Amino acid sequence: MKKYFYLLFITIIIISLIIMSGFIINKDSSDVYTLKITYRDIDNTVSAQGRLQYSTDKPVIAKNECIIDKVLVNDGDYINKGDPVYSYYKTDKYKNVIAEYPEIKNIYANISHSDTANNTIKKLKEYAVSETVYADKSGNVSGVNISDGDFVEKGSEILRISEKESFEISVNINETSIEKIETGQRAEITFTALKDKVYNGTVTSVANEAKQTSGLTGKETSVEVIITLDDIVDNVRPGYTANCSIITSTDKNVIIIPYECIRSDDSGEYVYKINKSKAVKTYIKTGTEYKDGVLVKSGIKSGEVLIKNCDSVHNGQNVIIKKENTDD
């Protein structure tokens, strides 16, 4: 009988120890939410705010000194982006022709009305290949200032294209950021009046001169940049406040983590990784900051799991991963 009491007593002690050890383990554990690390592409942007307005008439400017071959549009024509506008011959490539016909400089002004000029153009065609200028926007043609055979100086206005059905945004970019901005860059646009909608735009103009503008910190030097909406959007109105993010470059295959994962002490910034259900304190090096997190240069690899709410954990602590509620 004593033997059975002794075995029962030992069993009770063992069960109690198991229960107590489980209690101790649970007491030193913490419920956590986690984030699995993956590589991603991140856009570098320059942000600015402006007002939506109708696009104004845009001049087509001669980029080279040239002789006009053929004018391919007329006043009042409607053309689409990519349509041919005019063709021309560059004069700077044909110095031998100009040397052979020194009178060419005297007949540029009336070249389309001169028999000698017509002969010169014929001679040019023997040496030259006509180049074509295409419309970089859609709209109505106005102010055609050229005719077949005209001599045109570099920087001269050829004609204008009216974009009355399209919208643009004028923004001022601080001089500290303007070197990052180029025509053709993509922009993401949101409007204060239209929540949760993102529109696409393109930088179509960067002013050649800076100006003084009033900012939050007083007077600042900035450069006007024009962003054109890529598509006609029915539900926007001129005057709307536009928030523009111009994409200047894209970093490929980087690690971005939210700020809630990062803490710091005297030794630097750190995160808590999860390794075999334990929190492991790991120091990291960070880089560029973004609106949704910060770039991590070292200390973290793709596929690792971080603790989000790491204020409640310490190094080596057992953790219990909780599933976040994603329901609206």
Image (cartoon, rainbow, N blue to C red):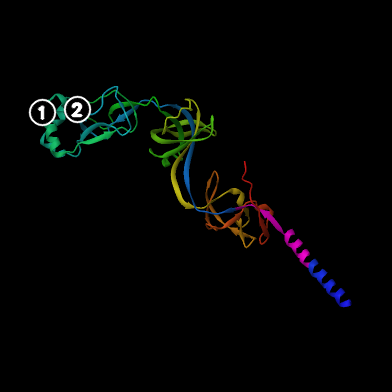
Q: Which residues are magenta?
A: 17-34
The residue to which callout 1 is attached is 116
Of labels 1 and 2, earlier in sequence is 1
Residue 180 in percent (x, y) is at 42, 42
User: In the rendered structure, which amino acid carries the disc numbered 2?
Assistant: Asp
Q: Where does the C terminus fall, quadrant-wise?
A: top right
Residue of label 2: 148
| Residue at the (59%, 48%) spot, across then down | 259
Membership of 31 in magenta stretch:
yes
Q: Position of residue 94 (x, y in %)?
A: 16, 38
Q: Is residue 47 left or right of residue 131?
A: right
Residue 269 shows in this picture: no
Residue 203 lies, with reference to residue 236, above or below; the image says below
Residue that sits furthest to the front in the current view: 1
The structure residue drawn at horizontal position 44% and vertical position 38%, both measured from the top left corner, is: 187
Q: Using the rendered image of the protein, determine whether residue 158 is visible from the camera's viewpoint.
A: yes
Residue 47 left/right relative to 266: left
Lateral position of residue 174 relative to residue 106, left or right: right
Indicate the quadrant containing the N terminus: top left, top right, bottom left or bottom right.
bottom right
Residue 169, given in percent of the width and then of the height, sits at: 44, 30
Of the residues tagged 1 and 2, which is closer to the observer?
2
Which of the 4 image quarters holds residue 112?
top left
Compared across the picture, whether 268 is left or right of 229 comes to right
